[in-house]
Amino acid sequence: MEQLLYMMDIREDQELQGLAYHVFRHIPNIPHRVGEDAELIAALIRIGTTSPLWHQRLRVLINMQVIYFRRLFMISRDHQMKLLECVATMLEDTQLEVRLGASTTLSGMVRCSPAALRSKMVQDFNKKFTKMLLDSPLPKRPRNGVSGVSTPNTGTSTPTPEHNKLVLTRHAAVLGLGALVQAFPYKSPPPSWLPSVLTTLANKANNDPGMVGKSVKSILSDFKKTRQDTWQIDLKAFSQEQAEDLDGVLWKSYFA
């Protein structure tokens, strides 16, 4: 797979690029006996977590998803967990495209998982991502600028590496919680845990600047859009306070 990924980057030979991409995409479709796909899964996880090239990390997400879907009832529970945990870890990737791809992949994997595994993973991921969000609050902005290191004579500021890492952690947490919400787009009424996830996003990250706040608004507005026909039923799953928190954010983001 690493050789194929390398060939896919040789722009001077477009035919080779196309052939390598075609072969790479079909690797998860190769039939294996039970237990024979352990090395393939290990290689996907290794590339996804260690490759220095972000587009290689992004490409293996596709194969992780396909092998998880196709071999869902043949791979061991240990391998199922490792694939899910790897994708969840990739939510903290330094490259935005990889984070977004990991969020979409995780959502699909949670959605198609067996009920027992799905319930456990939703509970575990909910706790993990909520804790990440609550444990990494953004510092309050000083009145004369944003948090960071002020540059002389300009009045502006340069975000520090610590600040950038904090934003990355918060974005990973938001995308993780969003993946759980988007795994159940049409379930009506929504699962019992879902209202608290939405209100956590609305109350703890909606006002974040940049990509974090934008992601929260997108998650909340998509949730409302997909449930227009059942909104009166779905709303009963929320407490009055939760409904007010959510309605305030949805109202503001509609006119934003």
Image: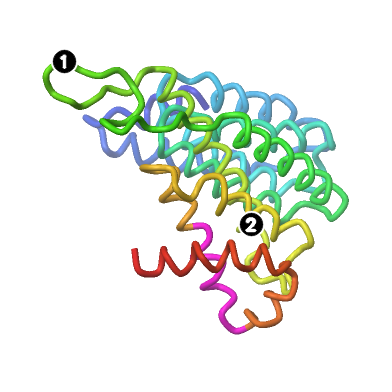
Horizontal and vertical percent position of residue 130: 66, 40
The disc, 2 or 1, on the residue closer to the chain's N-terminal end is 1
Q: In this view, does 89 lie above or below 199?
A: above
Q: In this view, does 97 lie above or below 115?
A: above
Label 1: element kind: loop
Could you tell me which quadrant the C terminus lies in? bottom left
The magenta span reads 219-229
Say which residue label 2 marks.
181
Identify the mark at residue 247; answer none if there is no mark: none
Check disc 1 and give the amino acid type.
Pro
Residue depicted at x 56% and y 73%: 226
Q: Is residue 182 above or below residue 45?
A: below
Horizontal and vertical percent position of residue 163: 42, 23
Residue depicted at x 72% and y 41%: 125
Residue depicted at x 20% and y 17%: 151
Identify the mark at residue 152; answer none if there is no mark: 1
Residue 198 in which image quadrant = bottom right
